[in-house]
Image (spheres, rainbow, N blue to C red):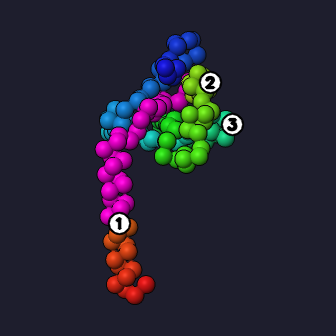
Amino acid sequence: ATDFGDRGGASSRRDMEVIESSATMRAWSRAQRAAGRRIALVPTMGYLHEGHLELVRRAKAVADVVIVSIYVNPAQFAANEDFGTYPRDEEGDAAKLREMRVDAVFAPRRLYVAADEDAMRARSATSAKSDEKTSHSSGG
């Protein structure tokens, strides 16, 4: 279970929004832009460290609202790499982001659906065949 929900507390000026769906993230960011706010995104794979926090500080210096995405993409792992053992610390990440008063966390469980992945593979295969035909016809 995600621990990104706000636990309240006297120090928080407002709740940190936790967004898990792409559609909700799009709607949230469109609403922020419609209100004239500048948005900064700090993309991460979680397990936040001082480098990530420095990026958040810089984002806060140049934007009205800051979103931190936390997504470990299974497609980034090779067959011999273990996606399941990639370090995660949702509770620690949530505490750090709340302390920094991040406006929103985009933490999708699964960002790409299988149909999209199949479509991407099909486009990639079609593109490779097209490149191969172009290479042969141009004498390459």
Image quadrant assignment for residue 106: top left
Asked whether 44 or 135 is in front, the reply is: 135
Q: Amino acid at mark 1?
A: Ser
Marks 2 and 3, Cα distance to the nearest angstrom?
A: 13 Å
Q: Which residue is mark 2?
A: 92
Task: Give the image quarter of residue 133.
Answer: bottom left
| Residue 62 belongs to magenta span | no
The residue carrying pointer 3 sits among few (fewer than 14), some (14 to 19) or many (20 or more) residues within 10 Å by Cα, namely few
The tally of labels here is 3
Residue at position x 43%, y 84% in the image: 140
Res 137 seen here: yes
Provide the residue span drawn in magenta: 98-126
Indicate the position of residue 136 as horizontal and vertical percent values. Answer: 37, 82
Give residue 90's quadrant in the image.
Answer: top right
Helix, strand or loop at mark 2: helix
Mark toward the start of the polypeptide (1 vs 2)? 2
